[in-house]
Image (cartoon, rainbow, N blue to C red):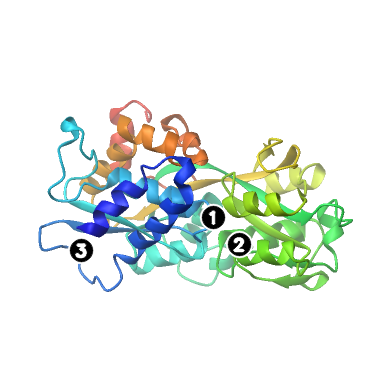
Amino acid sequence: MWISTVCDVAGKWPATARRLALLLGLICGLAPFGVTGAGLADNGSYFRIATGTTDGTYFPIGTLIASAISNPPGSRDCADGGSCGVPGLIAVVQASKGSVENVGLIAKGAVESGLSQADVAYMAYNGLGRFRGGAPYDGLRVIATLFPEMVQIAVRKYSGIYAVEDLRGKRVSLGEVGSGTALDAEVIMAAYGLKLNDYKVVYFNLGESADRLRLGKLDAFFIIAGTPVPAIEDLAEQTNIALLPIHGATADRLREKFSFFAAATLPAGVYRNVGDTKTLSVGAQWLVSTRLSESQAYEMTRALWHPSTRRLFDHGHPVGRLIQLESALDGLAIPLHDGAKRYYREVGALP
């Protein structure tokens, strides 16, 4: 019960306490390990949400979602100022390498849900890209599109690297192996005529990539995430950085070929001394599987869009403000879960 209480509180702290909240979120992520059944002695149930690395965006957003849908046994009623989540449910976050791993964990039943880029979900559902050759996971379902994720390519300012084409022969981290970032980074580099043997490819997590760039041991790294990304915020405070633009004819061709890419602009000031940057984005989605019952999915979707959750998103993380009911059905490339579909029809969001 102590862990569930910590999980509930961590997601409700303001952005100024973000790093401490993330630490407590990690504690929440440890809760399901060793739990083999869904039930607890007091009739509660664990619901695991696979997220991403602790210094990215998925982890804190997953923590907020976990807090929103949780309603541990013994909690006060929603009407009395208590939790407005699913009665008896304890949601916990689990750190991971990101989208590709999360989809695999859902497919295997190792977690009940996860966050993923829309493109990765589409490829997994249809057995394309990195998932080619395996059985398509057609049991994957969407609860909601959450927010746009920006493609960000960080370099040191004054390094002589001003465009993606300048990365030829450079040391470039594409993100962790198995991440959605790595999947799309390879596609983007190839679109600019850079095959894997045209540059020195490495696969580091976000934290290590940022550290190596700061120390001059890396020339560039990719991250696809909602902004601001804490690791890049910290890097920009310590080192003069720039973000490479992805726009023009090459970006247009990418969007024509892959409909999950959208044109986007990262505004000036998101990171210290980094100006407007034209780039691409993909939607971040909350995924489950058909193993989740219609009634459970309905209750979780209802809790996700409850007015109390709005306050949680608005004050829990800068990206949380972008999570809106009006955009919950944007960019759906795979089916909605029937329970989510029922909720959206009830509120008039879905014909």
Tag 3's secondary structure? loop
How would you rate the neighbour count of disc 2 (Cα within 10 Å): few for under 14, some for 14-19, many for 20 or more?
many
Q: Position of residue 42 (x, y in %)?
A: 10, 58
Above or below for 133 versus 243: below
Q: Position of residue 130 (x, y in %)?
A: 57, 67
Q: Which mark is residue 135?
A: none
* Pointer 3 residue: 38
Which residue is at the front of the view, 333 or 84?
84
- What amino acid is labelled 3 in the image? Ala
User: Can residue 331 be seen here?
Assistant: no
* Pointer 1 residue: 56
- What amino acid is labelled 2 in the image? Leu
Q: Which mark is residue 206?
A: 2
Decide: marks 1, 2 in contact (CB < 8 A)?
Answer: yes
Gap in Å between the C-alphas at discs 1 and 2? Answer: 7 Å
User: Can residue 125 be seen here?
Assistant: yes
Q: Residue at x 16, y 32 (%)?
A: 80
Tag 1's secondary structure? loop
